[in-house]
Image (cartoon, grey):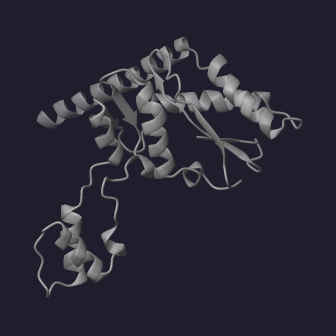
Amino acid sequence: EVVNRVTGKGRRWCFIHALRQTGLVEGAFLIFAAKHGHGDYHRQFDATRFVHWYTDQLLPALPSRCFIILDRCPFHTVARDALNPTQMRKAELQAWLTERNIAWEAHWLCKRLREEVDNHRDKEPLIQGIAQEHGHQVLFLPVHHPELNPIEFVWAAVKDQCAQEYSNATSFQDQRLHLEQAFTTVITPEYCTKVYAHVRAIEETYWETDLLLDEEEEA
């Protein structure tokens, strides 16, 4: 997530964190200054930074056999084999197939070669495989449903607290201090438990709606 001055201009702090039903994951907090003062937060993160945090901070801090819940933003779903066949030249496509002992024919055009590469490349999200190697499972949320993601409520509460603390005299470093304090004073274990209960209630409502629609279709 990103927090910046209420005007939407100026320097920004980007931060990553994780929570469980019992509270924030100790040791999972990462904060850094954004390189740009404009644009949405997706431009401040990339898969390399996220995977580094994921492997070096998050996974070591988790207990055994966890479900890791994530949305489907681009840097969460980068495939193990992240190459893009549409950006490869014909010789590169042929070489990729040959290196993997995948048969291809000399008369194939680029379109056919790209289809073959795409059919054989490993599309499993990189972080899913890493999680499984550590005994965990990743659950990706359905698209466009932030209300099912407990961490979204944390972002909102933290940013709201920072906005309340903000004044024209607030320095960039003050803003970081307010952000760090919000995670300790606002996002308590009790708050996390309530957030999970709230999300669970939304899930139950969706399940009940799905069952009613299914019964109507069967009638």
Q: As drawn, which residue projects farthest toward the right?
A: 169
Q: Is residue 73 visible?
A: no
Q: Position of residue 102 (x, y in %)?
A: 13, 69
User: At 17% across and 66% down in the image, what residue appears?
Assistant: 100
In this rendered view, identify the residue nearer to me: 64 or 22: 64
Q: Position of residue 18 (x, y in %)?
A: 49, 29
Q: Is residue 153 visible?
A: yes
Q: Is residue 58 left or right of residue 79?
A: right
User: At 49% across and 39% down in the image, what residue appears?
Assistant: 53
Tally the numbered discs: 0
Above or below, 86 against 2 in this view is below
In this rendered view, identify the residue nearer to me: 135 or 184: 135
In this rendered view, identify the residue nearer to me: 164 or 27: 27
Query: Toward which corner of the image does residue 64 lie, by quadrant?
Result: top left
Q: Position of residue 219 (x, y in %)?
A: 12, 33
Q: In this view, does 119 lie to the left or right of 178?
A: left
User: At 47% across and 51% down in the image, what residue appears?
Assistant: 48
